[in-house]
Each structure stands twice: as structure tokens, then as C-alpha cells.
Image: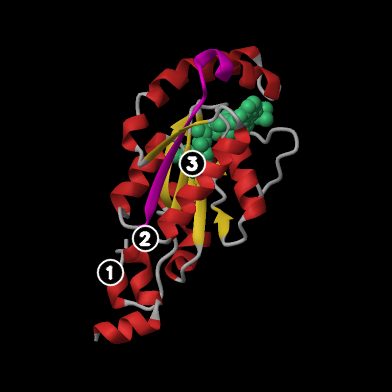
Amino acid sequence: MGDTPQNPFDTLQRRGLMFILSSPSGAGKTTLSKMLLAKDSEIKLSVSATTRPPRPGEIDGVHYHFVSPERFQQMIDEDDFYEWAEVFGHRYGTPKGMIRAALKEGQDFLFDIDWQGTQQLYQKDQQDVVRVFILPPSIEELHRRLQSRATDSAEVIAARMERARAEISHWDGYDYVIINDDVNICFAKVCAILEAERMKRQRQTGLIPFVRELMT
Ligand SMILES: Nc1ncnc2c1ncn2[C@@H]1O[C@H](COP(=O)(O)OP(=O)(O)OP(=O)(O)O)[C@@H](O)[C@H]1O
Ligand SMILES: Nc1nc2c(ncn2[C@@H]2O[C@H](COP(=O)(O)O)[C@@H](O)[C@H]2O)c(=O)[nH]1
């Protein structure tokens, strides 16, 4: 697809990170994503397209691109997605348009996507993808959070709880696993991971001119 990652030693411009936050529904990744976007101006949200209807307060183009099932299918047919998956009976996908060029220019992106999307992105780009899985402190607490959020019907909450077990079974497909008990402590851990990943040697060498000069 023309997005083969470059060896950072061969370029002065590192590619952006694809920083993925996944979790069972209700564990808190949207909360953590908002905190991260508010704190760190170096990372942008990858805005997904979805066929799910907006929740109260959700803005088209900000939280999601809300599209019809027909439009979503057209985007699949036109190869517009990095990845897409069906979740809770709706389709969700990461459009290439906004992020492809920006990643190449070194912009970091935050992805709030499920395990299926995480696997697809990782298969395409192992070098730039960082996979973080957020767990609730317990299944009972997950249920309580979904109820207290008050955005979903009892049936939808039951379906999300049912699916949570399957999602948690994919926890070993992630680089980092954090329990979101105290949200501020969890957020500090998310920030620490992001900073550490940015400082990895293979993401830095091309950026430090005097080190590069010494090596040539
Ligand atoms: N550490 C925490 N302690 C208590 N409540 C929390 C914590 N983190 C998040 N919450 C609350 O739990 C609810 C679910 O959080 P959030 O919407 O961020 O979950 P999510 O993982 O993004 O879910 P979904 O996948 O359905 O979008 C929200 O009401 C949020 O305020
Ligand atoms: N594979 C993808 N999963 C996505 C994407 N955007 C969101 N999601 C995941 O869907 C569920 C449900 O989200 P909700 O907003 O309806 O609660 C959640 O796990 C999201 O992470 C995407 O583009 N691709």
C-alpha cells in the first residue's frame, strides 16, 4: 500500500508513532484519550469513521465521522481504510486520508480502536505501532462504569459486557497492559509509555545531527 516503514537511520525525519489505546468497552480509554489530547499537543486523534449513531455530545468530524452503511461500504470498496472492523453490530474504520501524509512527516497519532484494528495496523507497520491495553480493576467495576456513563440502554450494556470477556482474551496481543483503577495514576502510566516510546534509540538517531555526523 506504499506505506512501507523506512529505516530511521536512513532519514532525518522520523515517522510518527501510531499510539493505540484499546480496552473492553467502559474501561476508560476514551477518558484517557481526552486527557492525553488535552495535555500533549504533539499527538492528534485519528478520527474513525463509523456507522454507529452519535451519542449525546458527540460531534461529527471530531469524535467520529458518522457515515451511512452505504458510504462505509463505498469507502471499503475504494480502499480508503487502513483497517476496519465490525464491533457491536456497527462498522468502524480508520480512514487513510487524514493520517497517511502526516505520519510520514513525523506527526504522532492516537488510535482508540479495538483488538481487530490493532492487529491489522500492527501487521501493516510493526515499527511505528505502540499497542496499549487498558483493563478495568474488575468485571464488576466495568459494569458499574458502563451504567454510570448512562449513554447506553440495558441491552447495549449487556452486549458490551458479553463482549468484554472476548476482548480481554486478546490482552496478550499488546505491548503494554495497564489497570485503570485510579484514572490519574493510569494516565501517568500512559504518558510515561508514550514518552519512553518517543525516546527509543531507533526513533532518535536520524534526528540528532551531531550523532549522525559522528557516524558518517
Ligand atoms: N479510573 C476510573 N474510575 C472511575 N470511573 C472511570 C475511570 N475511568 C473512566 N471512568 C468512567 O467510566 C465510564 C466509561 O469510560 P469511557 O467512556 O472512557 O470508556 P471506553 O473504554 O472509552 O468505552 P467505549 O469503548 O464504550 O467507548 C465513563 O463514565 C468514565 O467517566
Ligand atoms: N477496529 C476499529 N475499532 C474502532 C474504531 N473506532 C472505534 N473503535 C472501537 O469500537 C468500539 C466501540 O466504540 P464506541 O465509541 O461505539 O463505544 C471501541 O472498542 C472502540 O475502540 C476503528 O476505527 N477501528
- The residue at which mark 1 appears reads as 7
Count of numbered circles on the image: 3
Real-space CA distance between mark 1 and mark 3, rounded to the nearest whole angstrom: 25 Å
Residue 202, image quadrant: bottom left
Residue linked to disc 3: 21
**In the displayed structure, would residue 75 be above or below residue 30?**
below
The secondary structure type at the circle numbered 2 is loop
Q: Label 2, on which residue?
A: 200
User: What is the three-letter code of the residue carrying label 3?
Assistant: Leu
Quarter, ligand 1: top right
Residue at image coords 33%, 48%: 122
Quick check: is 18 in the magenta stretch?
no
Residue at left offset 40%, top offset 54%: 79
Judge from the rendering whether residue 25 lies leftward or rightward of residue 129; answer left or right.
right
Q: Position of residue 72 (x, y in %)?
A: 51, 44
Q: Under tag 1, what secondary structure?
A: loop
Tell me the crowding category of disc 1: few under 14, some 14 to 19, or many 20 or more residues within 10 angstroms, Cα based.
few
Query: Counting residues from the N terminus, which is met first, the one under dot 2 or under dot 1?
Result: 1
Identity, as a three-letter code, of the amino acid under mark 1? Asn
- Which region of the structure is painted magenta? 128-142
Sooner in the amino-acid sequence: mark 3 or mark 2: 3
